[in-house]
Amino acid sequence: FRNPALARTLVALARDGGPDFYRGALARQILREMAALQTGEPEFRGWSETDLASYAVLRRQPLCSLQLKHRICTMPPPSSGGLALLQTLALLNQATDLSLASAADAQTWRHLARAQIWADADRLYWVHDPLDSTVPAAALLDPAYIRSRARTMRTTPATPPTPGLPPGMDRYPYGRPDHSREQGTTHITIVDEFGNIASCTSSVETVFGSRHLVAGMVMNNQLTDFAFEPTIGGRPVANRRLPGRRPMSSMAPTLVFSNGRPVLALGSPGGRSIPHLLSRVLLASLIWNESPQQSVGLPHLSSRGQRLVLEQDPPIPWPLPLDQLQTSDQPARQQRVGSGTALVQRINGRWHGAADPRREGTALALP
């Protein structure tokens, strides 16, 4: 597949730098091509010169927590994936003795699935762009709150989870939306010779985004990551569409540290299932001590509401009979899982990489 227009855009960025994208010749080209879209879509209002020039990338503090005997740092709001990942691991740690766990332990898998849906209940309700109001991310990871949620999770297994009230919150200020759908995501993880690490998840939301190319670039469709209904039951939805706001996503590029040193970096596409996928991979890497290839290739499980989704035909077969994962309160179905985990892990002083065999991609070392 050849895209000469994108090649010219990348050359211009390499030569003239980022400002050219917002205010220079490349910006003028983008605005011209965006304006041309109005001929085919009269209701499209386009962008103004001020829209592009005033956009600013925000540097955010990572969301970090001690989980699985490691310091795990991941993406903060407005992504919900990092919070859900850390909450899933915290709830799992409360629900089972991980020191005795193995890949063949059915109870660990069942508790992992339960932790995922309880973490989903919180992130779907509370996460939004912090520019609008504070997201109680730290409170949602507070050890006392996690213990309380884990206790409720254990004692009411048949009850669908609802969002909790973390410390400092005395009411539910928002409406409760349903899950959205996210596709068109990719991930890359890189370690260079100097020890710099990049874990980068990128999305145009649905496959090929808005289906428009401008200067060779696929325009995204990220508006659909906002809640479709701005109010529910007379209450505003936290992730409602507002001017200048960024929508909630599920992306969760992650770095893992041991004794202050980075030992693992990973991320994956997968839409709302991203924290489900990464929590299983981290469990395999950090607790089951599986190799990078095994950690990435072992089966996934996920949840859709109260239904358990078990991966069909995983690259590495299930290490236990699937009927051991079936429970009376959570019916299960099998389906293929579209993960694309890119993982690098430091083992005995050397970095090892693994690319998910479920999608195109590879792990390689450059001289």
Image (spheres, helix red, strand yellow):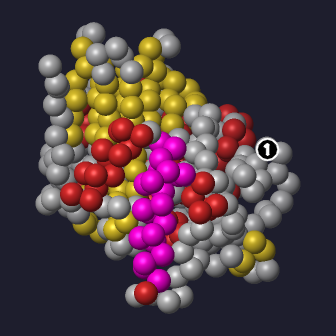
To which residue does mark 1 refer?
A: 167
The answer to whether any part of residue 285 appears in the image is no
User: What's the residue at 64%, 54% (across, down)?
Assistant: 54
Q: Could you say which is closer to the camera, residue 58 or residue 23?
A: 23
The answer to whether any part of residue 39 appears in the image is yes
Does 296 appear above or below 219? above
Does 68 appear above or below 14? above
Residue 174 horizontal side relative to residue 120, left or right: right
Q: Is residue 28 magenta?
A: yes
What span is in magenta?
A: 18-38
Q: Could you say which is closer to the camera, residue 73 or residue 14?
A: 14
User: What's the residue at 16%, 24% (across, down)?
Assistant: 366
Q: Is residue 69 magenta?
A: no
Residue 233 horizontal side relative to residue 152, left or right: right
Residue 312 horizontal side relative to residue 268, left or right: left
Predominant SS of the magenta segment? helix
User: What's the residue at 21%, 59% (across, down)?
Assistant: 3
Q: Provide residue 40's location: percent of width, then percent of height.
A: 40, 88
Does 255 appear above or below 5? above
Does 324 appear above or below 199? below
Q: Provide residue 188's location: percent of width, then percent of height.
A: 31, 41
**Amino acid type indicated by mark 1:** Pro
Classify mark 1: residues with Cα within 10 Å, few (<14), some (14-19) or many (20+): some
Q: Provide residue 118's location: percent of width, then percent of height.
A: 56, 55
Q: Could you say which is closer to the camera, residue 246 or residue 183?
A: 246
Task: Give the structural element (helix, strand or loop) at label 1.
Answer: loop
Q: Could you say which is closer to the camera, residue 262 or residue 24?
A: 24
Quadrant (top left/top right/bottom left/bottom right) for the N terminus: bottom left
Q: Provide residue 349's location: percent of width, then percent of height.
A: 27, 10
The count of marks equals 1
User: What's the residue at 42%, 40% (across, down)?
Assistant: 16
